[in-house]
């Protein structure tokens, strides 16, 4: 089975709607085992499908589009599933969130195996005798196992996995911490102030002295409450997100004593993988100074700046806008500054209408890269809500060595290493145009030292973003011979 293909679309739809055969499942499982892009697409469809089936209002057509679902809307027709020409519409056929979640379990079992390997750190003693919380409210909750029977007031014990298919469950811990679980989700209490979030969403409110330090463990990190409230989310593929709503939260990453401390209004993504790549996206002050809460302004002091003469930037695929309101040259991205005002096409680099493209930076030699920042700014002079060209949606890849991979092939097939996925609309939870900041910065770093050692960096860009600057920080691994 190839990806992308009609066969892939049909196989995924069959899994979600329960019409798949054993042969279909085996072929799809093998593709997901060997193709990272197919796995990402499958897991994202599963998550979206499950939430749509659960009736979550946040997943309106606009919200689904803003979350970078690659079709025009979630109602796009898939390829025919049978000879009679019938079609499946993602998320709108009669199906349950349970089907989608079980699809993740069947075909993406790595998360479950990872989780099982971590449970050795549970408190000593018999978990079945350690009650740490009670069910405060069940709302409209549904369980992955229909046989589960829980009522308000029931005890929640260490090691008791909460597997929610849809709806919401409110859990009150003995320490006073209040944890709201939003389905589909899998959560397991590990101790009196500690839970493991396999995937899904939890909202924590920790206002009592005893609940200080409440920790949500994810496949990539630990989020430790310092004061008040935060939201943690884990995608089925292990991508973790932290959004601090009140107070402060420490991020603890494997192999580090403590990562960054986030404050109210700040958000962080942590990619799965050995390097634990972190992505921070922030809203700017809307001035030519490009000031952000923690991300630095566009700079001429980075390794890729054109004044150094060490790096070059060019289009790898696609074309820049060439007519009315045309784009500037691609070199505006390495000139050390952002745009001078909010609607400055000639000072930006952006692709033609309804197209995708990619940008390539050649650093001339292998560089130990520690940080990559990108900046965008756009708001129409008269239409306040016209900000969609500010959103940043791209995948960043790296390659170390020669020759340069074949740019006509998908990066996953030509030797590129994926570094990070960025979608600022998902980050800011954009559901209406005014939710989208007009000035944005994205900063990609690693938990420990370098992001990686690369000569080439490739941005696969989705959309017509008016990028103003790209900064790459790092140092050569060997002295450059001129």
Image (spheres, grey):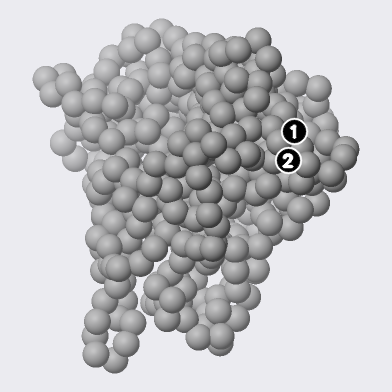
Q: Is residue 32 left or right of residue 384?
A: right
For residue 172, what is the image quadrant? top right
For label 2, the residue is: 158
Q: Residue at x 32, y 87 (%)?
A: 82
The residue carrying pointer 1 sits among few (fewer than 14), some (14 to 19) or many (20 or more) residues within 10 Å by Cα, namely many
- For residue 122, say whether it is visible: yes
Image location (x, y in percent) of residue 123 = 83, 36
For label 1, the residue is: 191
Residue closest to the far left? 382
Q: Residue at x 63, y 32 (%)?
A: 133
- For residue 347, say whether it is visible: no
Circles 1, 2 touching at the beta carbon (< 8 Å): yes
Image location (x, y in percent) of residue 257 = 81, 22
Disc number at residue 64? Answer: none
For residue 369, what is the image quadrant? top right
Front position in the image: 76 or 411:
76
């Amino acid at each position: 089975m190839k990806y992308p293909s009609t066969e892939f679309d049909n196989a995924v739809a069959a899994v979600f709607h329960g019409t798949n055969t054993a042969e279909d499942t085996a072929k799809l499982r093998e593709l997901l085992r060997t193709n990272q892009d197919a796995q990402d697409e499958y897991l994202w469809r599963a998550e979206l499908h499950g939430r749509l089936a659960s009736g979550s209002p946040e997943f309106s057509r606009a919200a689904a589009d803003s979350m970078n679902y690659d079709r025009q809307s979630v109602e796009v027709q898939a390829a025919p599933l049978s000879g009679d020409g019938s079609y499946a519409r993602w998320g709108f056929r009669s199906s349950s969130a349970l089907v989608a979640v079980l699809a993740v379990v069947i075909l993406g079992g790595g998360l479950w195996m990872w989780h099982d390997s971590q449970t050795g750190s549970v408190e000593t003693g018999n978990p079945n005798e350690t009650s740490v919380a009670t069910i405060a409210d069940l709302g409209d909750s549904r369980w992955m196992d229909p046989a589960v029977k829980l009522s308000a007031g029931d005890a929640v014990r260490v090691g008791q996995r909460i597997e929610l298919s849809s709806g919401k469950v409110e859990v009150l811990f003995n320490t006073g911490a209040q944890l709201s679980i939003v389905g589909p989700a899998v959560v397991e209490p590990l101790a009196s102030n500690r839970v493991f979030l396999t995937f899904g969403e939890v909202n924590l409110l920790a206002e009592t002295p005893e609940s200080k330090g409440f920790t949500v463990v994810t496949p990539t990190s630990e989020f430790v409450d310092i004061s008040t409230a935060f939201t943690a989310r884990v995608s089925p593929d292990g991508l973790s997100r932290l959004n601090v709503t009140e107070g402060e939260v420490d991020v603890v990453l494997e192999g580090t004593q403590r990562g960054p401390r986030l404050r109210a209004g700040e958000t962080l993504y942590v990619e799965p993988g050995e390097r634990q790549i972190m992505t921070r996206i922030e809203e700017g002050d809307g001035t030519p100074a490009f000031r952000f809460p923690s991300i630095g302004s566009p700079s001429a002091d980075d390794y890729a700046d054109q004044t150094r003469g060490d790096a070059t930037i060019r289009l790898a695929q696609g074309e820049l806008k060439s007519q009315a309101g045309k784009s500037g040259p691609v070199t505006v991205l390495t000139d050390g500054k952002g745009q001078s005002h909010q609607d400055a096409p000639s000072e930006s680099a952006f692709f033609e209408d309804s197209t995708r493209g990619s940008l390539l930076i050649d650093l001339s030699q292998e560089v130990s890269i520690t940080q990559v920042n990108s900046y965008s700014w756009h708001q129409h002079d008269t239409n306040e809500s016209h900000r969609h060209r500010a959103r940043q949606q791209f995948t960043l890849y790296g390659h170390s060595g020669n020759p340069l991979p074949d740019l006509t092939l998908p990066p996953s097939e030509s030797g590129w290493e994926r570094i990070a996925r960025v979608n600022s609309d998902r980050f800011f939870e954009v559901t209406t145009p005014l939710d989208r900041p007009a000035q944005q910065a994205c900063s990609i770093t690693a938990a420990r030292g370098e992001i990686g050692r690369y000569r080439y960096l490739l941005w696969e860009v989705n959309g017509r973003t008016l990028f103003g600057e790209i900064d790459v920080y790092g140092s050569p691994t060997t002295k450059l011979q001129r």
